[in-house]
Structures are given as C-alpha cells and as structure tokens.
Image (cartoon, helix red, strand yellow):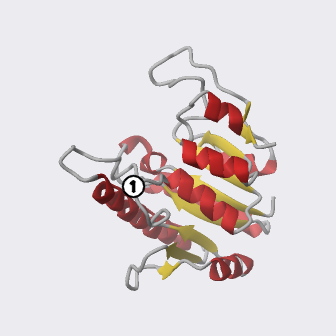
Amino acid sequence: MKRILLKLSGEALAGDKKTGFDEGTVTEVAKQVKQLCDSGIQVAIVTGGGNFWRGRSSNNIDRTKADQIGMLATVMNCIYVSEIFRSVGMDTLVYTPFTCGAFTELFSKDKAVKALGEGKVIFFAGGTGHPYFSTDTGAILRAIEIDADALLLAKNIDGIYDSDPAKNPEAVKYDVITIQEIIDKKLAAIDLTASILAMENKLPLLVFGLKEENSIVNTVIGDFSGTKVTVE
C-alpha cells in the first residue's frame, strides 16, 4: 500500500478514560504513523467524535444541530491529534469542508493530494459537512477522493463480530467478510451508507483494534489480526 486513510474512533482516542483524550494512546498512534511515513507511505487521517459527543444527548436537540456538534467534536480531535503528531516530528495539515477561521484549511482534493506527495500527514475533520452522514461515511468518501489503496478502521474492538461482543460473550469475529454480507446481515460495524459507498467504489476496508500493540503498522505490513472487508 502506498496511500492509506486511517480512521480513528473517538472512543479509541480516549483510551481507558472513555472520554476526552488519552495522550499516551495518541502518542503511540503518532509514533506508528511516523514509522509508516518514514517508509514512504502516504497517510491521511479521519477521527470520530465519540469521545466528546455521540448523537443527540436528548430528544430536545434537533438532529441537524446534534450532528453539527459532532462535526465540531471531530475538528477538536483532529487539531489535538495533529499537534501530537507534530510533537514526534511530522508535518501536518487539517482540512474541513467548512470554514473554521485560521484553525483549519478548506478541503480541496488537489491541495490534499499535493500535501500527501510532500510527505505531510493530512487530517480530514468535520465529516462531509452535512448532517445525517456518519464519520465512517466521511472517511470512505475522502479515501475515494484521494485514491487511497485502503481504508483502515482503528476501533476500540478488534474487528467485526456477528453480534456485539460487549453484550454477547459468545460473539464470533470474522477474519474476512464481504461488504455485501455486512449489508445483508445489517452488522453495526459500518453504517449502510458507508458500506454502499465502499462497495460501489471497490474500496477495501481493514478493521482492527487500536489497543493491540503496533496494530497500525502491523495492519499495513500484512501482520493482520482484525477483519478484512472485501469488495469484489
């Protein structure tokens, strides 16, 4: 793989704290990404926002406004994570699909691809900029736009299961599954819109647990213990 998009779940960024940031976790991610960049692999990042916000906190909040809060949570995450990346020696840029003053740059495919070619790690914050689309959908959209070879989904669980392993101790993990099976079985690991977008554009997905030692590097070099999602 020469160019990847890494999707980091917000919950995984929080580590054992469950909310906010765990600097040790993010620093470990940064060191792994630097290792990939030093080997010539181009890396783009999308973060979720679940360490700060997950949907509507009450029915008194409009869905559109709730989703906008979630978009801003991902902006905070990307700014923080990009600064940790800088602290270990990487050059970074944060793009958003809407103007955030001097905090970020407005997304442009041409500028993003140019930055990747210059060895910079780029962050896509703010999702698609529209409500009703998950960060998984936003990640797949950006991966397709920048012609990534694969989308790596780093989660707080180690792959895709036939049921929720937190609720069912006998849940079975898939080593390989097709995107069509995910759709047909209505598995919650990736939402329907994201699944269809990946299938139509033949974007392979690799789902793995961020907490596993050296998990990002191992996934890229093929020493993979998560779930491979095929699209053929």
What residue sits 37% from the left and 43% below the top? 18
> What residue does disc 1 label?
21
For this rendering, which residue is in front, 58 or 91? 58
Q: Can the viewer see residue 217 in this picture? A: no
Q: Where's residue 21, x and y in %? A: 39, 55
State the residue lying farthest toward the left: 60
Which image quarter holds the C terminus? top right
Q: Can the viewer see residue 118 in this picture? A: yes
Q: Is residue 92 left or right of residue 62?
A: right
Q: Where's residue 178, x and y in %? A: 73, 35
Q: Is residue 206 left or right of residue 64?
A: right
Q: Where's residue 96, x and y in %? A: 48, 73
User: Is 23 rendered above or below residue 230?
Assistant: below
Q: Where's residue 194, x and y in %? A: 58, 49
Which image quarter holds the N terminus? bottom right
For this rendering, which residue is in front, 186 or 111? 186
What residue sits 39% from the left and 66% below the top? 76
Q: Is residue 158 left or right of residue 80?
A: right
Task: Place residue 114 in its image quadrant.
Answer: bottom right
Mark 1 falls on what kind of element?
Answer: loop
For this rendering, which residue is in front, 58 or 34? 58
For this rendering, which residue is in front, 100 or 158? 100
State the residue lying farthest toward the bottom: 102
Q: Amino acid at mark 1?
A: Phe
What residue sits 52% from the left and 34% below the top? 188
User: Is 95 rendered above or below residue 51?
Assistant: below
Q: Residues within 10 Å of mark 1 (few under 14, many from 20)?
A: many
What residue sits 36% from the left and 57% below the top? 70
